[in-house]
Amino acid sequence: MNVLAPPLALSCPDLEQRVLAGAYGPDPRTVRAAVAFTTAQAVRHEGRRGGYRNEVLSLRVGAAVGSCAVEPGTLPAHAVEECAGTDVATLLDHPLRAVRVAALDAYLMHTTPHTPAHGARPWALPAGDSLRKSRARARAVVSLLDARPGQRVLVVGVVNSLLEALRERGLAYVPCDLKGGLTEWDEPVRPDAHAELGDCDALLVSGMTLGNGTFEPLREHARRHGKQLVAFAQTGSAILPRLIGAGVSAVCAEPYPFFWLDGGPGVVHRYGGRAGLEGAGGPAGLRGTGSPVAVEGSGGPVGPHGSGGPDGFQDPGGPAAPHRCGGPR
């Protein structure tokens, strides 16, 4: 199948301007968000010391849902009602950044969905409890990094399962999150990711950086210095793939509904990065659709395109325990 090449965006502001100009589909003044809703969650994985909370604003455009995580309790009560029935162009000018990000994400999910035709490689997540699915997603994310043991990865948005997967590969990391705190291994979490940029070989970045306005300096640093930037995105899952080649190297995109909402099998969508079967392994199984799926515990590629070639900084929520970071996001 030929992969379509959407217009190249040079930055998030550039992408938004191109959307407003109609470069990615219909005039956003003619496209409305019919539904707006929030999702709130708290979790504490079995065997993990810490917990965390999530709150996400989501907008539906046609059959597509776009999302932006927010700090729990900070979204004004009137925001959801204001968004419902409003055209995308108006939402892109909304005073709340979360609304603007969710609207851009929903529009791009509508016009450039996560399909092989738009460059996505589906990756199966196994059924199971929240920790099993979190670890499976972490392996899907980390396997996009082309890094050697001993290299240092700046992790912006602390997710303990991602740190665990980096440790398994022998990669050093600098955990960063606006909330600070400690990792599951009692490592201090740095609150200022930008102060740590010079001491890293690659970046692993949460989509929540879109929602808190800290993404662009990270992208620009990666672009200027030729470093890998791999994004794991529940927030902005359809936004970040459009920035591959402009400082973003790869994206593990996870649109709503997120894996932590359901115990059944799921899928994430990978763009760019290492295109092999890293970490997949295992025999092929069958989904209800008949597509082959790797069923080894860490998940694997779905179908013939699988091998082709989840604020502060948390995605998508702050920890419930005040000094513990973690969670699937």
Image (cartoon, rainbow, N blue to C red):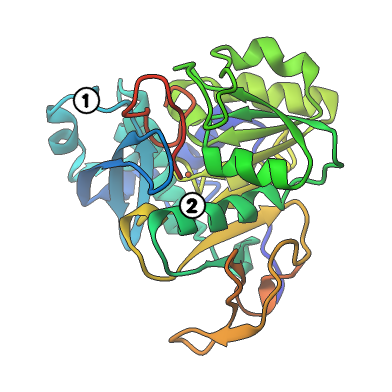
Rendered location of residue 137, percent (x, y): 55, 55
> Residue at coordinates 54% horizontally, 27% vertically from top-left?
13
Rendered location of residue 140, percent (x, y): 62, 56
Q: Which label is found at residue 149?
A: none
Q: Is residue 46 visible?
A: yes
Work out whether residue 195 or residue 67 is closer to the camera in this orientation and state it: 195
Query: Image quarter for residue 176?
Result: top right
> Residue at coordinates 49% horizontally, 41% vertically from top-left?
19
Query: In this figure, which residue is indicated by the disc labeled 2?
Result: 134
> Residue at coordinates 67% horizontally, 9% vertically from top-left?
195
Q: Across the whole image, how many numbered discs are drawn on residues?
A: 2
In the picture, measured across the screen, residue 188 lies left or right of residue 311, that is right
Q: Secondary structure at mark 2?
A: helix
Q: Earlier in the sequence, mark 2 or mark 1?
A: 1
In the picture, measured across the screen, residue 325 lies left or right of residue 82, that is right
Rendered location of residue 1, percent (x, y): 70, 77
In the picture, measured across the screen, residue 223 lies left or right of residue 136, that is right
Q: Is residue 6 visible?
A: no
Q: Please, what is the three-letter code of the amino acid marked with disc 1?
A: Gly
Query: In this figure, which residue is indicated by the disc labeled 1?
Result: 73
In the picture, measured across the screen, residue 302 lies left or right of residue 84, that is right
Rendered location of residue 33, percent (x, y): 26, 48
Work out whether residue 149 or residue 233 is closer to the camera in this orientation and state it: 149
Distance from disc 2 to disc 1, alpha carbons, whole Å, reads 24 Å
Q: Secondary structure at mark 1?
A: loop
Query: Image quarter for residue 295?
Result: bottom right
Q: Please, what is the three-letter code of the amino acid marked with disc 2?
A: Ser
Query: Image quarter for residue 3?
Result: bottom right
Circle 2 packing at 10 Å, graded few (<14), some (14-19), many (20+), is: many
Q: Residue furthest bottom?
A: 290
Cβ atoms at labels 2 and 1 below 8 Å apart: no
> In the figure, 93 relative to 281: above or below?
above
